[in-house]
Structures are given as structure tokens and as C-alpha cells.
Image (spheres, rainbow, N blue to C red):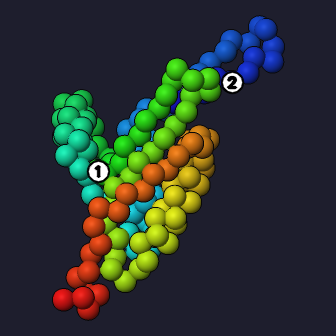
Amino acid sequence: MRTTVPDDNARVPRFQWVIAEPVIAAVVARAAVGVAGVVRLEPGVTGLASQVARAARQKINGLTPAPTEGVRVTVDRSAVPSTLRVSIDLVTSGQDQAAVVAQAVQRRVTRALTDATGLTPQAVVVSIMDIDTYGAGAW
């Protein structure tokens, strides 16, 4: 995601901030797991493949990858300004209402992204992959 600072003075060079998708995904993941009722993030097959590739690249470069499983970030740089969409796959507790948890995740993720990066996502899509009923008296 790129942000250009306006040039108020013609002699001052313009510059851009570049926030990479893995950084955005890490902010999203941290915010989502902090919501009451979220048991864990749940990566799908596509998420697992991209997570393995990213982790391998970062380990080769000597970096410790931030957890981002279950999070997908899409940045459309062809639009001006760029647009940001986030998708989160997660598992909720059987003791909480899934819709309430999903809405809380959307609010927390939007707030965390805006606070950490200055970016506001156009969409935060939450998919509940499973409901963890263990300990909720269901079985």
C-alpha cells in the first residue's frame, strides 16, 4: 500500500510510504485474535501455501515471520487512491454468538489498521470456518 505525501512546496521532494501486505496481514491477525470469542485463525489451503512460501523467504533472509495464518490482504494499486480489502478466516467459541464475534472482529481490525498504518480498509470480510464447541457443553 503506498501513500504519497502532498507537495506543498515545489522545492520539497515528494516521497511515498510503502506498507507491504505481510505487515498489514500481521496487524490484522493480531487484532483479530484479540477479540473475545475468537478461538484461533484458520488458514485455508491457499492460505497455507502462501504462508509456507512467505515463511521460507523470511527465514532465508534471517527474519522471524509474524503470524498471519487465516488472513488475506488484497491491495488494488491500479485505483487512485489504492484500495485495501482484508479477508479473515477464523474459528469462534461455541459460547459466543458467531455474528457478534464477526462484527467485533471487523471493528477491531479496521481500528487497528487505521491506528497502525493510517489506512482504512474498504472491506473486512470475516468467514467463520468452524465453531469450537469443546467445553461449551455441546457433546
Say if mark 2 contacts mark 1, CB within 8 Å: no
- Decide if residue 84 is on the left or right side of residue 11: left
Q: Position of residue 82 (x, y in %)?
A: 56, 28
**SS at mark 2 in the image:** loop
Amino acid residing under circle 1: Glu
Q: Residue at x 75, y 17 (%)?
A: 7
Q: Around disc 2, counting alpha carbons within 10 Å, would you say few (fewer than 14), some (14 to 19), or many (20 or more)?
A: few
| Along the viewing direction, whichever of 106 and 35 lies nearer the viewer | 106
Amino acid residing under circle 2: Val
Q: Residue at x 48, y 41 (%)?
A: 85
**SS at mark 1 in the image:** loop
Residue at numbered disc 1: 69
Mark closer to the observer (2, 1) = 1
| Along the viewing direction, whichever of 84 and 21 lies nearer the viewer | 84
First in residue order: circle 2 vs circle 1? 2
Q: Position of residue 75 (x, y in %)?
A: 47, 32
Q: Around disc 1, counting alpha carbons within 10 Å, would you say few (fewer than 14), some (14 to 19), or many (20 or more)?
A: many
Q: Position of residue 31 (x, y in %)?
A: 46, 58
Residue at numbered disc 2: 5
Residue 4, placed above or below residue 37 = above
